[in-house]
Amino acid sequence: MAGTIEFLFGHMADVWSTGSFAFQAPLGRFAILGVAALLILVVLILYRRTTAHTTPGLKTVLILLRSVALVILLLCLLQPVMNMSSVKPRESYIGLLIDSSRSMSIEDMDRSLSRGEAVKNVLYSKDGLIEKLQKNFTIRIFGFDRHAQPLLDAGDLSFTGAKTHTAEGMQHVAEAMKGLPVEALVLVTDGVDNSREDPLGMASIINARNTPVHVVGIGADTTVSDIEINQVSTSGSIMEGGIFEVQVTVQSRGYAGRESDLLIEVGEDVVSTKKIKLGPDGTLQRYTFHLTPVEEGTLLYTARVPLQKDEIIKDNNQLPFLVDNPKKQFEILYIEGHPRNEYKFIRRAAKTDSALRLKTYLMTGPQKFLRQDIDSAMELARGYPANEEALFKYDAIIFGDITRNLFTDEQLALTRDFVSRRGGGFLMLGGSTAFDNGFIGSPIEDLLPVTLVNDKYLPPELRGGVGKGDHPTGRTFALRLTSEGQRSMILRLEIEDESNRQLWQDMPPLQGINVTGRAKPGTTVLAEHPTLTFQGEPLPVLAYERYGRGRTMSIMTATTWRWQMLKPHEDTSHERFWRQILRWLTANSPTPVEIFLERNHFSTGDDVKVRARVYDQGYKPVSNATVWLKVTDPDGAVQDLQMQVDIAQAGDHFAAFTASKPGVYKMEVSSSGGQSQKGYASLSFLAADSLHEVRGAAMNRELMKKIAQAGGGNYYNLKTASLLVKDLENNRKVQNVNVQLDIWNIPLVFFLLLACFSLEWLLRRRKGLS
């Protein structure tokens, strides 16, 4: 019965109970009533003019039937409708964001598939995730690594991106789909992330716009066995003889206790190797190498651990690094109070190093001086320099066995400026008159890494010193290296730790020590007296510190020459020691132009920001110079850039370029004009394919779950990804729609018209009416 009623009325019962009746024709209520009355009047007139005999009752029935039929037709012409509100799913979009970075090429899925191949199978196969979603949603597909870009098909996914910027990728998609009714953003990734922004914060922002973020995680559920070279760092400067320090950090997972080799290579040649035992998962293990460069110039090394048979991630077992060993020459001014063995053998050691030019001013007698290895007759002609131009051209200064009264106060103050402002090195050597009371309270006392003590405040056993014979401070002693000294590259005379330790133990004893007070705060003591103490601490023999922009050192003995005279003729330990001391003094001495990079390691495609600092002859910053940067890329192509002045930092200039190719880049900066010295500086760096994607590249499930939680969505893996479609459909947003349903064409109207016209026709037929 209910079905019959629904058929006759053409719509469900709730349409008639909840809808509102209206006509679409633009006629008012009275106009409709007027037309209906007119139709009825016409019917009355027509039937009054009928000539055939009919009873009044029959005529009334016929008029009623005809009038009802015409009124129904009139109502149909007025297009009657039922207005009602309907709820239906809105047109919805899904933003699908697929990780296309290099880590997605790792083959840790079932059947040795890569993560990327597994993604393609799940998303793009017949009846895959995309096909299912397209049944109810409009899909906008994007790939992302450093940047996000639209994808047309699976062929656009290369999985070669150098970095994964998840937050930036989500932001890009959210902005690209702004204004569309987005149902959700679906992120498909392995969780390896190098974002500059916080992906959790970005997911939360997108969710606040009423767009949840769902995550589909890709990668093996089990721990991926892997060994990676995490970091390589080198000492700032290469010491004499080529010995420099390299620290290699290794991290592994799944190989605890396994032994392997750690290699340092130049090209195909292995230059050093260590046997290592891998630690617990995630442990950082640091190994130190001491190497000798094979030649001058820029050298490309590689630290490598051989690939294990069961290792899946193959690209992070090696890491290239650059060692800059340029040909340099440093000028050192050595002031000595009298001819002595220490002076002779220091000069001899310096002559064996082409990078060192030791210019000496030797007092040979009263008012008699000998200048050696000077550039011109005017150099040092008036003694120790008395102005910045003359003194600041040197890279380091050595005070030998010389008294305070040889210098004016202005010269000593200038020496302090030489270290603090110019950035030069300063060394005071021991001797019979060195470290004397005259330097107490002078600018030189400020420079020294040790405190000076007036002799009268010393205990009797410490009032002797160098040249005092059998006095405790004049006796022979074996130099004792501190723990810092054993690690220091300054005292690294042999490459291997044990060999270096043994060499120092076998050194001939020194004789005599200049007594000083304690080392100043921030000082590094490299060597000390084995028995003599002052104020509860061993007497320092060799110590250094930073002072302003420069560095200073004190050697409180005058008998290192014994290491030369008492060792076999072929032994070069003394020469290496002094060459390394002199190299250390000069290594950080600034040039009139300095060049800086914001970091040491660059990936291919990175923007390289270069900063140069320009000085005048007094090493004060200059901002009115013309500064050019010349960049030579790995293929030899040259780019010239004029550097811009940095108004925030006096003397600083900046420029930037893109390291678009892997390999070694050489940068050369030159300055001229203004108040600057005409200067030049060069620096090389290595740009390599980024390893961000293969460092710690196991699937980061925890991060992905946190992103989904922050984004108000759910986390799925490949096995549960099909649930994503159901969840999206069940949570699909709806909208209210106003619907007009025609009622002029319902079956009931047809049957009423048919009944009225048929009954009228039958009655008229029986009475013989036309």
Image: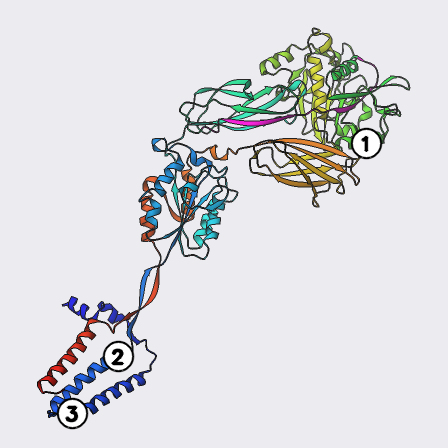
Q: Identify whether 352 is placed above or below 680.
A: above
Q: Mark 1 vs mark 2: give the one in front.
A: 2
At x 24% / y 79%, what residue is drawn?
Answer: 73
Going by the numbered disc 2, the residue's amino acid type is Leu
Q: Residues within 10 Å of mark 3 (few under 14, many from 20)?
A: few
* Front residue of this view, candidates 577 and 515: 577
Q: Residue 56: where, in percent of width, then height?
A: 12, 92
Question: Is residue 78 on the magenta stretch?
Answer: no
> Which element type, helix, strand or loop, lies under badge 2?
helix
Question: CA separation, marks 1 and 2?
Answer: 112 Å
Splitting the image into 4 quarters, where does residue 80 fall?
A: bottom left
Q: Amino acid at mark 1?
A: Leu
Label 2: how many Cα within 10 Å (few below 14, some 14–19, many 20+):
some
What colouring does the structure picture have?
rainbow
The quarter of the picture where residue 473 lies is top right
For the residues labelled 3 and 2, say whether their Cβ atoms are less than 8 Å apart.
Answer: no
Identify residue for label 3.
50
Q: Nearer the viewer, mark 3 or mark 2?
A: 3
**On screen, residue 676 above or below 14:** above
Tell me residue 172's x, y (percent). Answer: 48, 49
Task: Count all numbered tags in the image, as a single digit.
Answer: 3
Q: Which mark is residue 414?
A: 1
Q: Is residue 370 left or right of residue 623?
A: right
- Where residue 764 sits: x, y (%)? 12, 85
Residue 513 place in picture, x, y as percent? 74, 16
What residue does disc 2 label?
75
Magenta stretch in the rendered image: 314-340
The mark found on residue 238 in the picture is none
**Spatial CA span between label 3 and label 1:** 138 Å
The residue most toward the left is: 766
Residue 288 seen anywhere in this rendered image of the structure:
yes
